Image: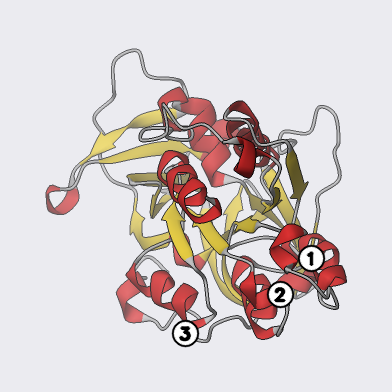
C-alpha cells in the first residue's frame, strides 16, 4: 500500500450514489478508516525536522517535492504508543488548504461501502476516540472507526478552525433573519461552529442535523407544499461525507424533486477539489465552498436570500 497515489485510481466517479471508499488503517491493532477522497498518497516513514514548542502530537515536518508537510502522530492523538521497532507509514492528506501527514502503524487496503452502513458512534466518557469519531462501520467482520480529521487538526492547531474572513461586517437583515436554514454536518465540532456563525450574524431559524438522512427526513416533508417551498426551507448547507446519507446524495434527492429543487443547496466540505466540484455540479449543487471558508459561504448565502 505504500505506493498508493490518488492519481492512480478512479475515486467513486459516480455522483450521488451514497457510497464511499474508505482507506482502512491500523493503530496498535485497532482498525480505523478515512475517506479515500481525502488521501493524496501513502508514504513510508520519512526523516522529520522537529518544530520548536509544537504540541506533542506534531512530530515534525518534511518537504518532499518542495511541498511542506506537517506530520501528526495518530498514536499520540488516540492515547497509545507507536510500536518501538515497526517502521510506520504516513497517510498524506490535503484538506482545508493544508498538507498533513498522519502517522499510522499499518495500512490494510481500500473498502467500498454505502453510507447507510455507517452508524453514529456511541458517546463513551473517557474513550480516546470520544468527540473525534464521526462513524462506526462493520467491514468484513471488523469494526472500523471513522475519525474526524478536521477536528483532530483544529484541536492541535487552533488557527485551523472556520475562516470568517469576508463576513466580518455581514449581518442578516430583517428580511433574511427569519429565513429557515437547514444544516447537515456530522462533526459536532463543525456543526456547532456553523450554527454559531449564522446565529452571530442574526439568523434565528436554524435546523441542524448530524447527517444527510435526518436532514432529508425533515426537508422531504415539504415536497407537497403548495406555495413557495423556500418559505419552509430557504437554503441547505451540507457537508459531503456523513453517516447514513452523504451530501451529494442529499443534494441529488432535493434537486430531483419538482417542488424541493427550488431550495438553494450549498456544499461545504474539506473535500472540495476539482473532481469533487464536478461531482457537486452533476447532482445540482448551487454553490460549493471548501472548509474553512465559512465567511465566503455566508456572503453568498446573504446575497441569494436577499
Residue 299 in view in this figure: yes
Q: Name the residue that disc number 3 marks.
A: 13
Of the pair 279 and 114, the residue shown nearer to us:
279
Spatial distance from mark 1 to mark 2, Cα to Cα?
Answer: 8 Å
Contact check, label 3 and label 2, Cβ < 8 Å? no
* Label ID, residue 219: 1
- Taking the spot 43% from the left edge, 32% from the top edge, the residue there is 164
Helix, strand or loop at label 2? It is helix
Q: Nearer the viewer, mark 1 or mark 2?
A: 2
- Taking the spot 67% from the left edge, 60% from the top edge, the residue there is 242
Where in the figure is residue 288, as x and y percent of width and height? 45, 61
Q: Nearer the viewer, mark 1 or mark 3?
A: 1
- Taking the spot 44% from the left edge, 50% from the top edge, the residue there is 300
Where in the figure is residue 8, as x and y percent of width and height? 33, 80
Contact check, label 1 and label 2, Cβ < 8 Å? yes
Q: Name the residue that disc number 2 marks.
A: 260
Query: Residue pushed farthest left?
Result: 66
Q: Residues within 10 Å of mark 1 (few under 14, many from 20)?
A: some
Amino acid at each position: 500500500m505504500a505506493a498508493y497515489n490518488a492519481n492512480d485510481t478512479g475515486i467513486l466517479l459516480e455522483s450521488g450514489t451514497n457510497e464511499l471508499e474508505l482507506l482502512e488503517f491500523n493503530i496498535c491493532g485497532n482498525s480505523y478508516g478515512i475517506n479515500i477522497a481525502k488521501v493524496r498518497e501513502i508514504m513510508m516513514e520519512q526523516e522529520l525536522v522537529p518544530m520548536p514548542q509544537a504540541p506533542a502530537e506534531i512530530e515534525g515536518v518534511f518537504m518532499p517535492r518542495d511541498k511542506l508537510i506537517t506530520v501528526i502522530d495518530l498514536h499520540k492523538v488516540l492515547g497509545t504508543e507507536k510500536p518501538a521497532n515497526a517502521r510506520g507509514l504516513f497517510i498524506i492528506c490535503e484538506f482545508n488548504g493544508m498538507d498533513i501527514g498522519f502517522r499510522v502503524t499499518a495500512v490494510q487496503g481500500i473498502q467500498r461501502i454505502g453510507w447507510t452502513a455507517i452508524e453514529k458512534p456511541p458517546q463513551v466518557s473517557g474513550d480516546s476516540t470520544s468527540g473525534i469519531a464521526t462513524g462506526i462501520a462493520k467491514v468484513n467482520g471488523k469494526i472500523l472507526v471513522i475519525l474526524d480529521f478536521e477536528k483532530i487538526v483544529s484541536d492541535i492547531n487552533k488557527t485551523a478552525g472556520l475562516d470568517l474572513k469576508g463576513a466580518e461586517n455581514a449581518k442578516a437583515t430583517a428580511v433574511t433573519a427569519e429565513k429557515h436554514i437547514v444544516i447537515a454536518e456530522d462533526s459536532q465540532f463543525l456543526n456547532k461552529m456553523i450554527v454559531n456563525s449564522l446565529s452571530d450574524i442574526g439568523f434565528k431559524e436554524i435546523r441542524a442535523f448530524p447527517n444527510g438522512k435526518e436532514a432529508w427526513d425533515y426537508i422531504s416533508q415539504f415536497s407537497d407544499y403548495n406555495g413557495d417551498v423556500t418559505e419552509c426551507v430557504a437554503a441547505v448547507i451540507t457537508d459531503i461525507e456523513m453517516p447514513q446519507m452523504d451530501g451529494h446524495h442529499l443534494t441529488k434527492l432535493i434537486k430531483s424533486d419538482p417542488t424541493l429543487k427550488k431550495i438553494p443547496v450549498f456544499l461545504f466540505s474539506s473535500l472540495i477539489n476539482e473532481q469533487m466540484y464536478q461531482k457537486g455540479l452533476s447532482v445540482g449543487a448551487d454553490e460549493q465552498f471548501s472548509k474553512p471558508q465559512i465567511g465566503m459561504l455566508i456572503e453568498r448565502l446573504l446575497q441569494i436570500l436577499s
